[in-house]
């Protein structure tokens, strides 16, 4: 079986840089996968991606060698199992709030007797290898998203879940969950109490022997997160990259002509 690149990097003591795909387009996936990311995640929760196109995107990324992951829409066995059968090497599941939900997530990712995953690896036996069934439980990654006040309060019981590989922090929803609408929505939190919560989740996760992951809006914040000790950081996404590059190009032309530039939201591709 083709080994999981993320697990290889961690075994060597490294940290992982992950890309993010919200646009339903295999060509976009192919482009992003060739840019030097260690892993690339397809967003089937907030992204404009359904199952069939998502499978095509996994196919488009195969040649690059990046580790493909999927953020599923919700804690649903069908969504998790179909994403794995299509070729995802990791599952990120939103809104995991307690140990019971974490255990359900793990059960959907692992085959019996560890879990309840149904055997039918339609595509992944071609992309990962004919011996997929013998090694999948060791190679597939299972991440619970921590993004509510309840999840923070239950972090120790969540990370004690057998078979869970780590947690993935969604900073926008985490801020809403902890403070309501007290602050703006978005990534790259600077509020001291939110940074404290993010570091607390990371510390408790790693003390339990699991991996801690964080979504970031800018390379600068991702670098900070790596300095804090995060095992995986996501650096922006295809939507935000397209917005940023397109706006910079147009603004430069307008500036050279002495015209005023436009403006756009910095909250594209949300969590």
Image: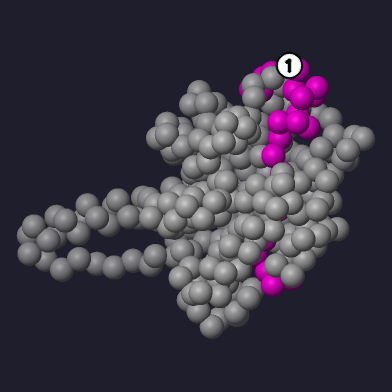
- Between 56 and 106, the one lying in front of the other is 106
Secondary structure of residue under mark 1 = loop
Verify whether residue 117 appears in magenta: no
Q: In which quarter of the image is residue 80?
A: top right
When the figure is inspected, residue 167 is found, relative to residue 199, above or below; the finding is: above
Q: Residue furthest left?
A: 257
In the image, 115 versus 227, the foreground residue is 227
Res 146 → quadrant: bottom right
Q: Is any part of residue 187 visible from this angle?
A: yes
Label 1 sits on residue: 130
**Residue at 14% in and 60% down:** 254
Could you tell me if residue 145 is visible in this image?
no
- Answer above or below: position of 107 versus 31: below
The N terminus appears in which quarter of the rendering? top right
Q: In which quarter of the image is residue 108?
A: top right
Where are the magenta residues, as a range? 126-150
Q: In this view, does 57 lie above or below 244?
A: above
Residue at left 29%, top 68%?
263
Q: Residue at x 70, y 53 (%)?
A: 207
**Within the magenta stretch, is there residue 140?**
yes
Choose between 127 and 99: the one closer to the eye: 99
Q: Residue at x 57, y 46 (%)?
A: 231
């Amino acid at each position: 079986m083709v080994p999981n690149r993320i697990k290889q990097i961690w075994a060597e003591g490294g940290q992982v840089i992950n890309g993010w795909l919200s646009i339903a387009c295999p060509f976009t996936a192919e482009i992003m996968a060739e840019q030097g990311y260690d892993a690339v995640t397809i967003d089937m929760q907030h992204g404009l991606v359904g199952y069939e196109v998502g499978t095509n995107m996994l196919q488009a990324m195969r040649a690059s060698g990046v580790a493909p992951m999927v953020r599923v829409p919700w804690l649903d066995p069908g969504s998790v199992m179909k994403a794995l059968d299509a070729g995802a090497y990791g599952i990120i599941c939103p809104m995991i709030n307690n140990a019971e939900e974490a255990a359900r997530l793990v059960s959907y990712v692992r085959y019996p007797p560890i879990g309840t995953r149904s055997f039918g690896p339609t595509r992944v036996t071609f992309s990962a290898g004919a011996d997929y069934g013998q090694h999948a439980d060791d190679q597939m990654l299972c991440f619970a998203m921590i993004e509510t006040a309840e999840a923070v309060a239950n972090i120790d019981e969540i990370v004690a879940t057998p078979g869970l590989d780590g947690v993935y922090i969604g900073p926008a929803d985490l801020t809403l969950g902890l403070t309501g609408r007290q602050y703006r929505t978005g990534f790259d939190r600077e509020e001291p109490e939110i940074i404290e919560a993010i570091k607390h989740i990371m510390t408790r996760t790693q003390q339990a022997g699991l991996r801690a992951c964080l979504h970031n809006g800018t390379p600068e914040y991702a670098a900070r997160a790596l300095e804090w000790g995060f095992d995986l950081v996501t650096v922006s996404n295809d939507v935000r990259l397209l917005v940023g590059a397109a706006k910079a190009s147009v603004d430069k032309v307008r500036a050279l002509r002495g015209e005023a530039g436009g403006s756009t939201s910095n909250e594209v591709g949300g969590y």
